[in-house]
Amino acid sequence: MSPYPMAATPSAAVEGILANRGHASALAHKDRWSCHAAANKARVVFQVSRLWCDANPKTGVLIAAGPSLKASLPELRALDRGAHEIVCVDMALKFLLDNGVTPDYVICADASEEIARTLVPAPPEVALLLNVVVHPDTAKDWAGDIFWFCMMSNYIDKEAGDWMQRDHQKKSGVSSFLVPGGNVSSLGVSFLGSVRAVAKILLYGHDFCWTDDAEFYAGGVQQDLAEQRVKTEADAGTVLTMTDNRGNPVKTTGSLLAFSSWYSDIARTMPGLLESRTPTTILSLGGN
């Protein structure tokens, strides 16, 4: 029997923990994010807006780092690259490259040095989408093009009397924005659906759950970060159990449940945009 409580949606207590965590994180890191944005200004050559399309006949492919990604590798390798644009999150990059899948774009939004190390060397045809608040040493030796953006987080810095994203814009000189839904992959939805103007986005590796702690991320990559995340969530009481789309018991967290709910909302408000190709998931897209 699982030591974690069953849940289909985050409880009010878990939602409170998540909200307090988000506010505490913004308060603790806002000055560092501002400094990073200023430091990265000299690095900016291209902005994400440079990639804008008025129309795009290709299908978007958005790859997160859920453990089921391993099972999707044959399908990903078989994609017609002339008909698909592949975007992956930073945590999935090494696993994909090691297994013969080269994305068109990689997204990195986190300001920590720990996440920065997930950006392993990639071929020069792989473009990087970088949040202006990333650590200034992030991807210093990246071979391909880098396109910068500000994240529209909608936090007000009461001390500065301004929106946080506005501060990042002014410090970095970057006027391109992507709208997040809580996790880095959601920025891929914003990028593919708005900037790249695709009509369909196929979701791979969007498990929002796991069974084996050693496989929290696809292929067991960044095991130390996985262990730290699981411990943090367990200590906070936000690790939960539920059944996946196959009826099997899995572990999830309050934040992962909240992220999956955002995708469900997008599927409801923008019918047909998202299609799950993730074989094991708690995500429901209303018929997909």
Image (tube, helix red, strand yellow):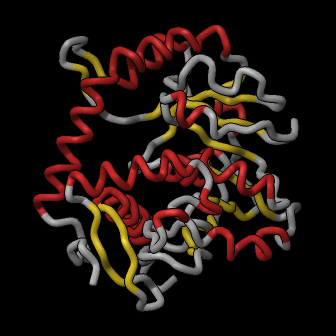
Image coordinates of residue 144 in percent, x first then y, are 82, 32
Which one is nearer the viewer's eye here, 165 or 3?
3
Which one is nearer the viewer's eye here, 246 or 180?
246
Which one is nearer the viewer's eye here, 219 or 183?
219
The N terminus is located in which quarter? Answer: bottom left
Q: Residue extending furthest bottom? A: 247
Q: Residue at x 77, y 28 (%)?
A: 142
Image coordinates of residue 49 in percent, x first then y, are 64, 32
Q: Is residue 262 above or below residue 140?
A: below
For the image, the number of numbered tags is: 0
Q: Is residue 173 above or below residue 191?
A: above
Camera sees residue 145: yes
Q: Is residue 229 above or below residue 273?
A: above
For this view, does 77 lie left or right of residue 69?
right
Image coordinates of residue 15 in percent, x first then y, are 18, 56
Q: Residue at x 27, y 69 (%)?
A: 240
Q: Residue at x 79, y 75 (%)?
A: 74
Q: Is residue 174 above or below residue 263?
A: above
Q: Residue at x 72, y 18 (%)?
A: 45
Please identify the quarter of the rendering in which residue 195 is found: top right
